[in-house]
Image (tube, rainbow, N blue to C red):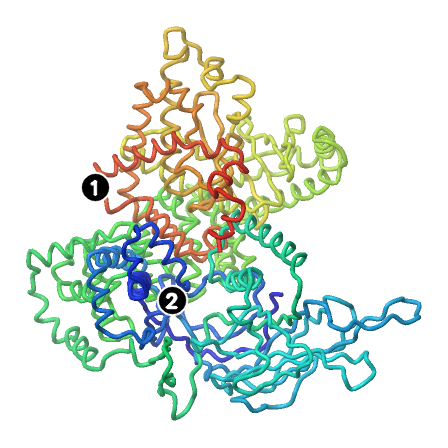
Amino acid sequence: MNSGFPGHVGSDVKGCVGRCHYWSLEQLLKALYFSSCSSEWMNTPWSARAVRLNDFPPRLPLICQPLQSPAPLLCRRRPPPISCTFPAAAPSSPTTSSRLPCSINGRNLEKWIAAALRFFSVVILSTSLKAAFLSNMGGNEFRFFFSCDINLPVTFRIERLEGCLPNPPAEIDSPTGNKNAEIFVECTLYIDGAPFGLSTKTRLEASGCPYCWNELITLSAKYRDLTSRAQLAFTVWDVSCGNDNGLVGGTTVFLFNRKKQLKTGRQKLRLWPGKEADGAIPTTTPGKVAKHERGEIERLERLVNKYERGQIQQIDWLDRLTFKTVDKIKERESITSENSHLSLVVNFCSFEHRVVFQESGANFFAPSPVSSTNELVTVWDPEVGRTNPSEHKQLKLARSLTRGIIDRDLKPSVIERRSIQGILKYPPTRALTGDERQLLWKFRFSLMSEKKALTKFLRCVEWSDVQEAKQAIDLMGKWETIDVTDALELLSPVFESEEVRAYAVSVLERADDEELKCYLLQLVQALRFERSDKSRLSHFLVQRSLSNIEIASFLRWYVAVELHDPAYAKRYYCTYDMLEDSMMRLEAGVNRDEDGFKLWQSLVRQTELTAQLCSIMRDVRNVRGGTQKKIEKLRQLLSGLLSELTYFDEPIRSPLAPGILITGIVPTESSIFKSALHPLRLTFKTASGGTCRVIFKKGDDLRQDQLVIQMVSLMDRLLKLENLDLHLTPYQVLATGQDEGMLEFIPSSSLAQILSEHRSIVSYLQRFHPDEDGPFGITAQCLETFIKSCAGYSVITYILGIGDRHLDNLLLRDDGRLFHVDFAFILGRDPKPFPPPMKLCKEMVEAMGGAESQYYTRFKSYCCEAYNILRKSSNLILNLFHLMAGSNIPDIASDPEKGILKLQEKFRLDLDDEDAIHFFQDLITDSKQSRYLETPAALRLYLFYGQNNLSLQLRL
């Protein structure tokens, strides 16, 4: 179950954050461990060593440095209150554990040094690579709560009893036939071997095997009262026997594991028949099965428990395959098992972060007792990672007001200038180190003429220091004015200063309306990060809307969709009211034919229109029969009961193109697509005498499609600014709700349909643009359009990580323009295993004359040129996605930081233009040679895994 736990701790209780160099140190210690255990391991090849390393306990905790407050890439304003839940699925952001090994199996220092020297040449490379990766990631963090800070009662859920009772009750004559046992569970908390508080009992359960209670138990003791050796004792009783010998069995479990971390998630405890649960130390009824008695079932259940706690990454398609195999193994084991044990399944609550045992009071800083046995010892040191008073004083003096007089005349040396230029090239997602922050601050006056340096300088400011913040704000006003694209970075959640965000808005005021529309979706999302409901950004957006009806219409829709988010509904309601009040006060003038009231009503009628379309879709879906009957019902409604939709009393501004006035729907030209959601294809009459066709969908979240098409439109604009027109088709998409929206209808055919009817793309294009003297019997212009559009979408879909590409969502227009639709998977997600880097099917290559033709060479040239152009604007694209981090778009909301880093990887900012060309040419070759998508799924899995159960072994 995923049920919440009542009660919270106040926001004064803060979680600790520990930074750890996780991978490089872990690999080093694993390697040292294996080398010290066996000399044979040193002679194995590196591929075999990697397998051996994976056999070591996963996520070995190494070093913990708790800090005073969390500082992730996408930070929150304040630490959240502590609460606990019972997870049924993996948490959205699994944490990485860390600890400090004080002794490793009692091995002496000389053996460790010898092993370290043997591995030095290899490990130093691994360490440098991983350190570079971690510097981009901002460092791994281990977040945890101290148990002494949690003022919540101990809570757990008793789920069920698995297995068969040893002595089932005899049959008796009754109308119901057999009589089941009536059992309950008695729960007792033991502190250091002594009972603590009164026992708690569950209700009687007589449903038969398996006996399910699913009952939440809350003890009087609180987590802060627990010791590291606190235990829960469970005794199962059967009252149906009618005598005093109703004991079924007992089991005991420690609440903290050997790492002094509170146990969470589902625990399957072995029940000892005929024994009452023993809370002594050591106990005679341990719930944990001994290692030598564990079988395949126990191993799988432990791994499934880790998966549910988020310690194993979720991969949807592989998870489905794995759990099917797990179910088969369980079924096979249950049949072949000769002696099945009784087990009690208990679900411990989970917290947002790990809970580490720590006593309060005088022993707060006391280390854990060191055992004399050869085992890893966990030492939690709260002092590690805190600010050094002397270093803090030195930093304050270096950044004091008096120091500014000296720094004003400082000039960086050649080496320092080279370092600064490297820092300025960092992507906006990369955090600055302490030395880099100090370097930028030291030469801040000499950098004021470089506009690219301002965003980096503001990142190195300690905004909690009033004097330092005042210096930074004064310098910001004198700095060379930054570009509009860089101002977007200052609106991200990293910058909370109102002065900085107001400065960013003042820069945005220089953007024209066309440029502003490219960023409008992200600017509406940036309202989430403002300090007040009526911020400078919200006033700016409303004021620009008053002079441009298209901006006003899109702003209204973007804000209206966010009203469904309860966390920010109040803020967006405030912005919506500001827009309405400002427009209603407008008066008709020289540049405006309508007054504010009429303009606002023309926008409100858009909502009324979409509501009526939703009603039509409900009526159409209720019609039994095929698509043709639904089309007849649609036209019947438009011609009969809803005939007012064929001619509007007042023209309505099209939601997709507010500059166009629509006057009614043409029933005879309206239809329904043959799909599960039955989207409507509607033809509207326009006030100018023409028509426009749109698709209306209900039951599908179009916000992700809306974002992708916005990015396609932006990239098309960036390419055209460099005089490269790749004939893209950025059709209009507008989400009018969480599960509804409109799309512009583009006449086209899918490649699957074209290949089915015409057998080749060239034959299809010959039908519309024949030319006997042209290449392949079509006009040169048509072929050039096809090649350019293929190149453009190949680059864009690769950068955005668009998945689920198949011949049904690749469409081709009559003029040769190819374009993509249906963007349910982005940022590297794909329902198919092992997708190629980009969708480049053999039919597309054949339409260019094959891989050896001059037209295919031209295609690769366009791809590389477009890739390098878009790499120059990588900061802009990364900033826009960073502003979307708080949105409810599925593939971004699941893990914003990971998604942005995946996007950053696609730009390969570590390469120059020439190397980037070679890199992308290799990608094209890999995509062209990939045949995984053409291989049946079952055969693909067999070829990859090699045997039936290997998939499970690789996954778990």
Identify the residue at horizontal 55%, vertical 24% (top origin): 753
Name the residue nearer the viewer: 105 or 651: 105
Disc 2 residue crowd, few under 14, some 14–19, many 20+, Cα 10 Å = some
Q: Is residue 828 left or right of residue 853?
A: right
Name the residue nearer the viewer: 947 or 718: 947
Identify the residue at horizontal 82%, vertical 73% (top origin): 169
In which quarter of the view is residue 220 placed? bottom right
Q: CA distance from mark 2 to mark 1?
A: 37 Å
Under circle 1, the secondary element is loop
| Circle 1: residue type | Asp
| Circle 2: residue type | Leu
In which quarter of the view is residue 195 placed? bottom right
Q: Which residue is mark 2?
A: 60
Asked if 379 appears above or below 615 in the picture, the reply is below
Q: Kindly tell me whether residue 499 is visible in this rendering.
A: no
Q: How many marks?
A: 2
> x and y percent of residue 914 in the render?
21, 36
The quarter of the picture where the N terminus appears is bottom right
> x and y percent of residue 589 in the render?
44, 44
Q: Which residue is mark 1?
A: 912
> x and y percent of residue 437 in the render?
21, 65
Query: In the displayed image of the protein, which residue is found farthest to the top?
Result: 772
Asked if 519 appears above or below 924 in the picture, the reply is below
Q: Earlier in the sequence, mark 2 or mark 1?
A: 2
Asked if 855 appears above or below 542 in the picture, the reply is above
Under circle 2, the secondary element is loop
Q: Kindly tell me whether residue 239 is visible in this rendering.
A: yes
Q: Is residue 666 left or right of residue 772?
A: right
Identify the residue at horizontal 34%, vertical 66% (top origin): 498
> Of the residues tagged 2 and 1, which is closer to the observer?
2
Asked if 36 appears above or below 659 in the picture, the reply is below
Identify the residue at horizontal 18%, vertical 67% (top origin): 438
